[in-house]
């Protein structure tokens, strides 16, 4: 996926989940943050950030904060809408996938994708996508905050496997140099437990390593298999 008009700025502060104050061309601006997660290790005073300028004159804010430079790591995309777009582009590039439907209602959840894979017969598949922005000592972790929604979706996928679906959890890694993601049991122990149970039941885990640029986020590397920190 690619962004339109981008500008660079310097992060000042974040008074709430939805907005931040950024210095753009030496002028303080209130901008929309396209991620309601904590991002505490990223959005630090003085950090260099990338923003996309909106062409909607009716908006209250002219800019969306989409990426931030992290010392020792480089550019991290924090746009929470980007992972689904990246995953959709990646799915469309797979030669054995013949049909894709986003935002598919299954059980009591709306999962990110239903798709069909051509093998000898048509294989019905479900996928949930999670964006990864948390890095510690060169390793990616998810989630960066407790996620009841994430638990619900994992349990839904686990149940769907027993009903004949091929199910996937897709981690879109929104930074370079990281190829696998560990469950962040320090922040949300239950997520690690439920992920382990899901993987044991047959939910397949895919890690999409991305090319991260100021104007672009694209899946370029693929790794599969459930990983724990001591693997």
Image: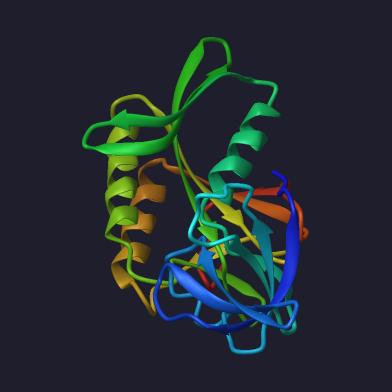
Work out which residue is located at the far top of the displayed protein and give it. 121
Quadrant location, the N terminus: top right
Q: Is residue 208 left or right of residue 190?
A: right
The vertical placement of 12 against 66, above or below, is: below
Q: Position of residue 70 (x, y in %)?
A: 69, 79
Work out which residue is located at the far bottom of the displayed protein and give it. 45
Q: Is residue 52 left or right of residue 194?
A: right
Occupied quadrant, residue 210: bottom right
Q: Position of residue 128 (x, y in %)?
A: 44, 43
Work out which residue is located at the far front of the displayed protein and give it. 57
The vertical placement of 156 against 61, above or below, is: above
Residue at image coords 65%, 27% = 92
Residue at image coords 30%, 54% = 149
Residue at image coords 42%, 65% = 36
Q: Position of residue 99 (x, y in %)?
A: 54, 17
Residue at image coords 57%, 10% = 120
Quadrant location, the C terminus: bottom right
Q: Is residue 8 left or right of residue 64?
A: right
Of residues 51 and 231, the one drawn nearer to the viewer in this rendering:
51
Please say which color scheme the image uses.
rainbow
The vertical placement of 183 against 168, above or below, is: below
Q: How many marks?
A: 0
Of residues 167 and 13, the one drawn nearer to the viewer in this rendering:
13
The vertical placement of 10 against 201, above or below, is: below
Q: Position of residue 64 (x, y in %)?
A: 58, 61
């Amino acid at each position: 996926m690619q962004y339109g008009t981008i500008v660079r700025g310097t992060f000042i502060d974040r008074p709430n989940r939805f907005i931040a104050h950024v210095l753009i061309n030496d002028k303080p601006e209130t901008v929309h943050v396209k991620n309601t997660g904590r991002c505490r290790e990223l959005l630090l005073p003085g950090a260099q950030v990338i923003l996309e300028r909106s062409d909607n004159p009716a908006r209250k804010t002219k800019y969306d904060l989409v990426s931030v430079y992290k010392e020792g790591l480089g550019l991290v995309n924090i746009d929470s809408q980007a992972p689904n777009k990246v995953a959709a582009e990646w799915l469309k590039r797979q030669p054995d996938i013949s049909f894709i439907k986003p935002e598919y209602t299954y059980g009591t959840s709306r999962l990110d994708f239903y798709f069909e894979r051509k093998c000898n017969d048509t294989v019905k598949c479900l996928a949930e996508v999670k964006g990864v922005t948390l890095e510690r000592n060169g390793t990616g972790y998810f989630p960066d905050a407790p996620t009841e929604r994430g638990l619900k979706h994992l349990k839904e996928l686990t149940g769907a496997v027993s009903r004949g679906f091929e199910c996937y959890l897709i981690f879109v890694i929104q930074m370079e140099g990281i190829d696998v993601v560990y469950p962040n049991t320090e922040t949300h122990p239950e997520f690690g437990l439920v992920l382990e149970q899901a993987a044991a039941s047959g939910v397949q885990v895919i890690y999409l390593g991305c090319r991260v640029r100021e104007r672009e986020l694209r899946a370029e590397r693929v790794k599969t298999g459930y990983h724990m920190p001591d693997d």
